[in-house]
Amino acid sequence: MAKEKLMVTPPPHLRSGETIASSMRDVVVALIPAVIAALVVFKVNALFNIALCVATAVAAEWLTRKALKRDNTIGDWSAVLTGLLVALVMPATAPWLHYVIAVVVAIVVIKELVGGLGLNIFNPALFGLAFVLICSGFLAPWTSKLGTFPGLFDGATGGTPLTFIKHGMEGSSAAPSLLALLFGNRTGGALVEVGAFWVLLGGAYLLYKGIIRWVIPISIIATVLILTYILGGDGVYAILAGGVMLGSFFMATDWVSSPMTPYGQAAFGILIGVLITLIRLYGAPSGAVAYSILIGNAFVPLLDRLFKPERFGAVAAA
Amino acid sequence: MEQAGKSKTFRGGIHPPYHKELASGKPITPAPIPEELIVPLQQHIGAPNEPAVSVGDKVTVGQVIGSSEAFVSAPVHSPVSGTVKAIEEVPNFTGARVKSVIITPDSSQPPFSGTPRDTSSLSAEEIRDIARSAGLVGMGGAAFPTHVKLSPPKDKPVDTVIINGCECEPFLTCDHRLMLERTSDLVEGLKLCMRAVGAERGIIGVEANKADAAEALASAVSAEKGISVEVLEVKYPEGAEKMLIFALTGRKVPPGKLPSEVGCLVQNVGTAIALAEAASTGKPLIERVVTVTGPAIKNPGNFLVRIGTPISALVEAAGGYLGTPAKLIMGGPMTGWAQPDDRAAVVKGTSGVVALTLDLAAEEMERECVRCGKCVEACPMFLMPNFIVRSARRGLWDEAESWGALDCFECGCCSFSCPSAIPHVQYVRKAKAEIAARKKK
């Protein structure tokens, strides 16, 4: 036998086959329905934004790691995913430089400068979005006048669906119907907010593939639903409008920036749900989901320790 | 036998690919006696043995060749009749250099001739003596001396003896074959264990993927008082002592404690059969069943192998290698030892030799932990393995201990599940060694 070829490594000698790359790729696959919906509504604007964000993300990660003399990690799909998520959470109509700034902040500052994937505290894509939101205050309603390629879609001028929550006008005729929020909202918001249903499809896929667990999305959605009703709003409208679905299934479930134990995840989800509802009703109508998840991210180290599992047998009365 | 409803199990664990079909249908066949046997003088957990023979001595099969006065030890017997060629330090399957007796077998091998004995009247003390003088150790891999296990502390009475018929390690099928082919010996072994510790209840736990064995055992124990067969969910590590006790009795062995703490004793299938054999004929532990399998083995099978047989001879008995093996494992693929070559010898605790091809053995590059929590979800001890790793990487051994490094029994579920290909078990071993070294100071 060719003895020199035998591999000697510590056990276990079998692996599940799941890798960072395979999981990230699955998340990208899960976003396909939402991407198609965005392309249908925003046409070439969406295509341009997505291409720009993904290309910027890949280039930024490659350059940063090269400059820091680290391994090339482009192959793990994480930069692609971050770029795609930034494109999806920004409106179709922002100036192109805003996308580039958001992506560079996400990849370079939030992820690579703290050591790379796994060491970041905050969700990179959401931090990029929040940075641009705060710095430029640009989040304009969708109109046919703006965008890199204007005039290609029919957008309404006026507030985003979230302005109606803030003013308690979810039921007014100007507000989108629940059906529109599910399948084809054109009132305003981010690229991904075309329809909650398309995001839910992807969320179901992630659950099926075991990439995410149900605790975080369900606790966020349930909290927003119930608390909005308690505070006198329309709970169903609240969970379908804006970024609740994307935030719950794709952002708050980000492995790196969420707690690892079931109870920790439930506490994390409830915290985020409370923040979303309160910020929307009493604070800024836009960006509530992003801010809430980022605040939640900051609590993760605490939640991991607070909800550390009781080790096997430790509580047994012998 | 459990008929309906959910089969018993524990929380956590994984579902690895099992590949049991390679060898599960192959009846146990005796492997040829090799040209040379390497018999390590220490094959158990505990005090080392001193050689009882010298170079040039003629030895007969079953003769004691190494022993110790210490309580926690098990003597070693000559697996064949032959001549002691050398007594020297040889790397064992873990790579550690262990003083070993090297025996050249005679060309003709008389079978072991024992004295038949009526086992029905043996006392607890006699059963323990038989286990000790036969050199019995746990044959599932841990190799803890059996007579010590059969001597639980007076203040912790054992009421339940469990036979571990889970064989939850992928690929391995030796226990499965033993349960099918040595059914009545297994039941006899269980009864002897129960008598030795004064237990009223005996349970044989079998994973659901060995339904034929469970059925055979169920009909064999149908007339036995206090003995039952339970079917367990197919999940790794169902056969880990603490998990098995919990699944079958609902009792939880506290951290750092032994099963006797909760009135249980767990025995491996092979050990129980060896005990029955030793009791009825006086035959010491000189051979065992080893599964030789894997995609890089031509004719996978289950072999009755003399202790001291090198892997190479065993592979030959299984038709040789198929293609080029990428990894050769002594034991199961979840907890076994990767071999640098095929020279190591079978010991009492060797359950299998698994030869993997590159598609199964390939290792991903270790990445930073991405905190996915899969290790936390998989850990049957409810630890946070990634935090043990994080502490170990920084050399923070107290912190590693506070995250439960010492409670880890190294099942490998964490590393199996890890998308970052982190070798948690390696870090845990390092942490255990460091923590132990600091406690000595």
Image: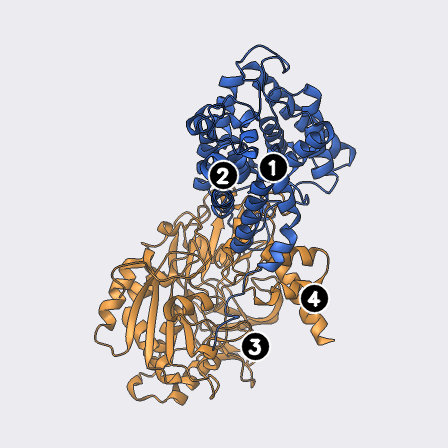
Chain colours: A blue, B orange
Q: Is the residue under label 1 in contact with that under label 3 (CB below 8 Å)? A: no
Q: Residues within 10 Å of mark 3 (few under 14, many from 20)?
A: some
Q: Chain of mark 2?
A: A
- Asked which secondary structure carries label 1, the reply is helix
Residue beneath the point at 63% across and 25% down? A54
Q: Residues within 10 Å of mark 1 (few under 14, many from 20)?
A: many
Q: Which mark is residue A233?
A: 2
Q: In the image, B409: left or right of A257?
A: left
| Quarter of the picture holding the N terminus of chain B | bottom left
Q: Amino acid at mark 1?
A: Ala
Q: Which one is closest to the eye, mark 4 or mark 1? A: 1
Q: Which residue is label 4 attached to?
A: B398
Q: Chain of mark 4?
A: B
Q: Which residue is label 1 attached to?
A: A288
Residue beneath the point at 61% across and 69% down? B98
Q: Amino acid at mark 2?
A: Gly
Q: Nearer the viewer, residue B134 or A120?
A: A120
Q: In the image, A156: left or right of B202?
A: right
Q: In the image, A73: left or right of A243?
A: right
Q: Chain of mark 1?
A: A
Q: Gap between marks 3 and 4, in whole Å?
A: 27 Å
